[in-house]
Image: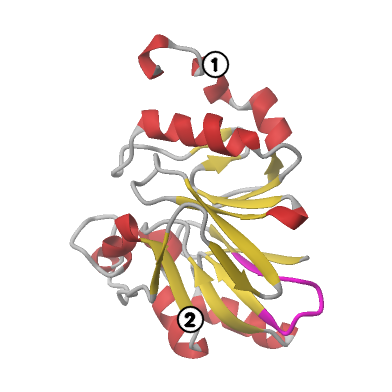
């Protein structure tokens, strides 16, 4: 599998170009800078057919509309976050930052499988950071793209339309079930599920009565 990580956009969100090695088409996850990503696609000889959005916050959809215009790719997002990407008034929506709103072509939900770039991306609903947050697992490669649900030894904030109880359920019940998977998060460096099970500070609250 070929994964090209491009930290970009106003707060250096991780955008990912993903495909099976040697495949001429690819998916782009969370495009934060359309020009940078498009230039890299051209240099790699890749055609983007799918734009996969982990959630609707402005820094992860910053370049989605322009990349769609450049490539004709289909845009996927969970319905609960679609309004943010499409410009619903909110200080975390695209429109608040003068961005072009990006209307999704398809809504995704738990268990959906999207074929792109010669790979199958399985949708895992992981609310908590946002109501409609999702992760994309490529099971045959034991790889998961977690957006802002899970970072290396950290998790996404929950004060921008999220919920800490939902986030903990997403982490402990869903992501921690992915034994042996490499994690590509929405910011900073990659990690593994095993590492997070050992070192993520949120683990200390796993059995706290407040979260039961």
**What secondary structure is marked by label 2?**
helix
Q: Could you tell me how far apart the alpha carbons at marks 2 and 1 are, in whole angstroms?
A: 41 Å
Residue lying at 63% horizontally and 35% vertically, measured from the top left: 177
**Rendered location of residue 66, percent (x, y):** 43, 82
Between 30 and 123, which is closer to the camera in this rendering?
A: 123
Contact check, label 2 and label 1, Cβ < 8 Å: no
Residue to which mark 2 is pinned:
67
**Res 63 seen here:** no
Residue found farthest to the top: 209
Q: Which residues are magenta?
A: 16-25
**Res 13 seen here:** yes
Residue 28 drawn above or below residue 80: below
Residue lying at 50% horizontally and 82% vertically, measured from the top left: 73
**What secondary structure is marked by label 1?**
helix
The part of the image, by quadrant, that contains residue 20 is: bottom right
Residue lying at 46% horizontally and 29% vertically, measured from the top left: 168
- Magenta includes 70? no
The part of the image, by quadrant, that contains residue 87 is: bottom left
Residue to which mark 1 is pinned:
204
Between 67 and 26, which is closer to the camera in this rendering?
A: 26
**Rendered location of residue 193, percent (x, y):** 68, 36
**Rendered location of residue 96, percent (x, y):** 24, 64
Left or right, residue 71 beside residue 141: left
Left or right, residue 72 beside residue 160: right
**Rendered location of residue 167, percent (x, y):** 43, 35
**Way the structure is coloured:** secondary structure
Q: On the rendered image, what quadrant is the N terminus found in? A: bottom right
């Amino acid at each position: 599998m070929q994964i090209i990580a491009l930290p970009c956009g106003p707060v250096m969100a991780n955008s990912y170009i993903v495909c099976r090695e040697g495949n001429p088409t690819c998916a782009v996850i969370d495009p934060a800078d359309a020009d940078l990503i498009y230039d890299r696609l051209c240099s790699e000889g890749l055609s983007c057919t799918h734009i996969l959005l982990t959630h609707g916050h402005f820094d992860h959809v910053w370049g989605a509309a322009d990349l769609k215009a450049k490539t004709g790719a289909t845009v996927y997002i969970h319905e609960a976050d679609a309004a943010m990407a499409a410009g619903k008034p909110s200080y975390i929506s695209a429109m608040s930052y003068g961005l072009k709103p990006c209307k999704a072509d398809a809504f995704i939900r738990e268990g959906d499988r999207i074929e792109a770039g010669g790979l199958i991306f399985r949708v895992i609903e992981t609310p908590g950071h946002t109501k409609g947050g999702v992760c994309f697992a490529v099971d045959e490669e034991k790889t998961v793209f977690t957006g802002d649900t899970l970072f290396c030894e950290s998790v996404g904030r929950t004060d921008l339309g999220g919920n800490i109880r939902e986030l903990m359920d997403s982490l402990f019940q869903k992501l921690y079930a992915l034994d042996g998977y490499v994690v590509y998060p929405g910011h900073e460096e990659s990690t593994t599920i095993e590492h997070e099970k050992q070192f993520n500070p949120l683990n200390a609250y796993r059995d706290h009565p407040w979260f039961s």
